[in-house]
Amino acid sequence: HDEFGRDLAVMNSEKANPNVVSIITECLRLYSSASDPNYLPKIVAQEAKGAKKIESVDRPSLTIFATGNPDEYFMGSNEMSLLNGYVARFTIVQGRTYSKKKTVTFEEAKSSPRRRFDESLRSRIRDWYNLEQKAADGFFEVGFNKEAFDCITDFDNRNESIIKNSEDKTSGLMQFRSRLSEKVWKYALLFTASKYGAREDLAVDRDCAENAVALAEYESNYFNVIQLNFSSNHQTRFIKKILEWGAEQPGRCFRHSDF
């Protein structure tokens, strides 16, 4: 959904009520329980007190897709959301800078074709639905060849070396990097499913593994840039914003009125 930063700010606020604060805790439990066929959510809402029976969730798969303004995202986050692994579970991708708005004439607007679902897309959706029905009582194992295994293992070794040699143990960088070794295999699975479609004999090949490593490395490099934007209090964030603004001024010189 849009404006994810504002939602984070509400959940991380010191004035947030316990139910709102527990959203992050529950999300972390969901992420850790993806293979649990009998997951029981912690119910704290007032409406659930009279429930006689709470049905379990079969292998919960929590997916959050969100966009938002970077400044609001960083202001809404804090160091705790780094240390507890919440931010580390997201794939953070930087959006493009402002691009020129496309303009069309009246004639072009009237003659543009109506957008429809392509039949090939409909077919892919049906295939995945049918495969999911077959997998209702079990799992389909997705294998990998040696080239894919070696590719991801090389990345994992490099990542582990960076973690071990890092002098920064408290800012959440270690927690973020440690998740990459887990996420790179998930990325490889996604690339494989996207490339080959709904099949029971899916297997990760080197091409998909290389794409997964490229995404993990991008994520790692980008996090190095944005890491300092996650701060523990409003005053620290405000000071950093002032320093960034000052650094952008020509010659790093500006008038008091500008400041």
Image: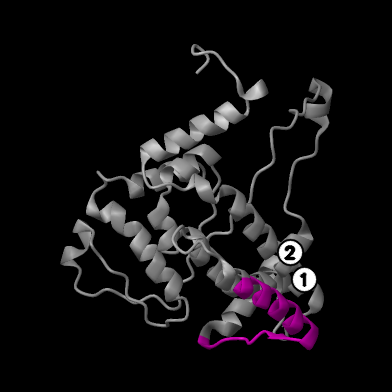
Most foreground residue, 170 or 138 = 170
What x and y, as percent, mark residue 53? 23, 75
- 141 in magenta: yes
**Residue 2 against residue 212 in the figure, above or below:** above
Q: Position of residue 59 (x, y in %)?
A: 45, 77
On the image, the x and y values in percent for residue 88 come to 51, 62
Residue 226 or 107: which is nearer the viewer?
Answer: 226
Q: Nearer the viewer, residue 46 or 218?
A: 218
Numbered mark located on residue 214 in the image: 2
Magenta span covers which residues? 137-161
- SS at mark 1? helix
Q: Give the residue displayed 79% in from the left and 28% down from the top.
A: 110
Which disc is residue 210 wearing? 1
| Image quadrant where residue 159 sits | bottom right
Seen as rendered, the residue at the extreme left is 50
Q: Residues within 10 Å of mark 1 (few under 14, many from 20)?
A: many
Q: Amino acid at mark 2?
A: Ala
| Inter-mark Cα distance, 1 to 2 | 6 Å
- Does the magenta segment cover residue 157? yes
* Residue 134 position within the rendered picture, expressed as x and y whole percent measured from the top left: 60, 84
